[in-house]
Image (cartoon, rainbow, N blue to C red):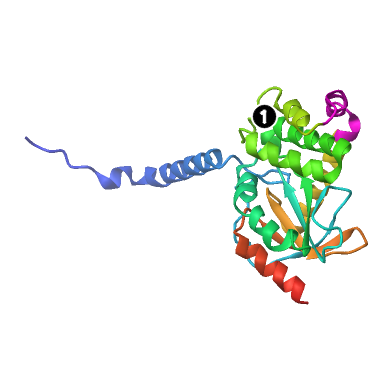
């Protein structure tokens, strides 16, 4: 059987435009797969930030009036910006927080301040979770807040799926909260405004550190001013990453 020889020179003028077309298609596919460009917002998804962000940054961060886990007199403050629906936040809760609690919180060396950063692609569940936890705090204080916090992470389906219908109230009742007051709080402006203040602070911080995802931590020496100058740690890092920063602060 005879074969027809491919004329390379004849089709050579088409090579450049074809290459450009294929390159553009590759970029479009990459943008689609990674969830799109960041756009104007600096609040990133939990996978948008590198686990190793290079040289640590020190940023002034407010503790606001958010719930505190640990001794009020602890010399080191650790602020966590978190999303109850974020799988990386759940990973930190399940794998690392217990080690920090045992080594530093229970020993009076560190207090944890929890601040809300519900990501829009996890809403409405993420914001609803945050509001529910704050409503638990309204009745029971910080201790009950963190009990509710633990139950959300233990029971949520995650990734924006949230708690099954009625589970938020079920948790409240298990914690001996007044069901009527709790349900009223869920729709109150004060609960929504509390979450909105944390989100606004996170967006402000994003401009200083080049974006912010969940979880994000700031660890610094405690201060009576209502703010700390905190070392920035991005992501669900292992215990040793927190240990190094905390031990350095405690040794100063």
Residue 238, how many percent across, how many down?
A: 59, 59
User: Is 107 rendered above or below residue 94?
Assistant: below
Q: Residue furthest right?
A: 225
User: Is 160 rendered above or below residue 115?
Assistant: above
User: Is 18 rendered above or below residue 106?
Assistant: above
Label 1 crowd bin: few (<14), some (14–19), many (20+), radius 10 Å: many
In the rendered structure, the answer to whether residue 203 lies left or right of residue 101 reads: right
- Residue that mark 1 sits on: 163
In the rendered structure, the answer to whether residue 27 lies left or right of residue 19 reads: right
Span shown in magenta: 177-191
Residue drawn at (70%, 57%) of the image: 101
In the rendered structure, the answer to whether residue 30 lies left or right of residue 159 reads: left
For the N terminus, the quadrant is top left
228 or 45: which is nearer to us?
Answer: 228
Instruction: Please tell me in which quadrant of the rendered image residue 243 appears.
Output: bottom right
User: Is residue 190 inside the magenta stretch?
Assistant: yes
Residue 154, how many percent across, how many down?
A: 64, 38
Q: How many marks?
A: 1
Residue 199, how many percent across, how many down?
A: 80, 43
Q: Which secondary structure class fits the magenta region best?
A: helix
Element under label 1? Answer: loop
Residue 209, how many percent across, how many down?
A: 73, 58
For the C terminus, the quadrant is bottom right
User: Is 50 rendered above or below residue 251?
Assistant: above
- Please say whether residue 61 is visible from this viewpoint: yes
User: Is residue 126 inside the magenta stretch?
Assistant: no
- Please say whether residue 84 is visible from this viewpoint: no
């Amino acid at each position: 059987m005879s074969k027809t020889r491919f004329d390379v020179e004849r089709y050579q003028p088409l090579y450049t435009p074809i290459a450009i077309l294929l390159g553009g298609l590759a970029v479009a596919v990459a943008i689609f797969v990674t969830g799109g460009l960041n756009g104007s917002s600096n609040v990133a998804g939990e996978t948008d930030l590198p686990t190793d962000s290079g040289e640590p940054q020190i940023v002034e961060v407010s503790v606001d009036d958010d719930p505190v886990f640990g001794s009020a007199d602890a010399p080191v403050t650790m602020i966590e910006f978190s999303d109850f629906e974020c799988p990386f936040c759940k990973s930190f809760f399940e794998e690392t927080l217990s080690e920090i609690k045992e080594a530093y919180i229970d020993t009076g060396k560190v207090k944890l301040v929890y601040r809300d950063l519900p990501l829009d692609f996890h809403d409405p569940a993420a914001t609803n979770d945050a509001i529910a936890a704050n409503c638990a705090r309204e009745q029971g204080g910080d201790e009950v807040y963190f009990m509710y916090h633990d139950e959300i992470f233990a029971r949520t389906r995650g990734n924006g799926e949230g708690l099954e219908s009625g589970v938020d109230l079920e948790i409240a009742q298990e914690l001996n909260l007044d069901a009527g007051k709790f349900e009223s709080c869920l729709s109150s402006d004060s609960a929504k405004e509390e979450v909105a203040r944390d989100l606004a602070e996170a967006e402000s911080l994003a401009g200083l550190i080049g974006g912010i995802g969940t979880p994000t931590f700031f660890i610094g020496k405690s201060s009576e001013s209502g703010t700390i100058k905190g070392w920035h740690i991005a992501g669900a890092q292992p215990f040793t990453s927190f240990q190094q920063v905390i031990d350095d602060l405690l040794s100063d």
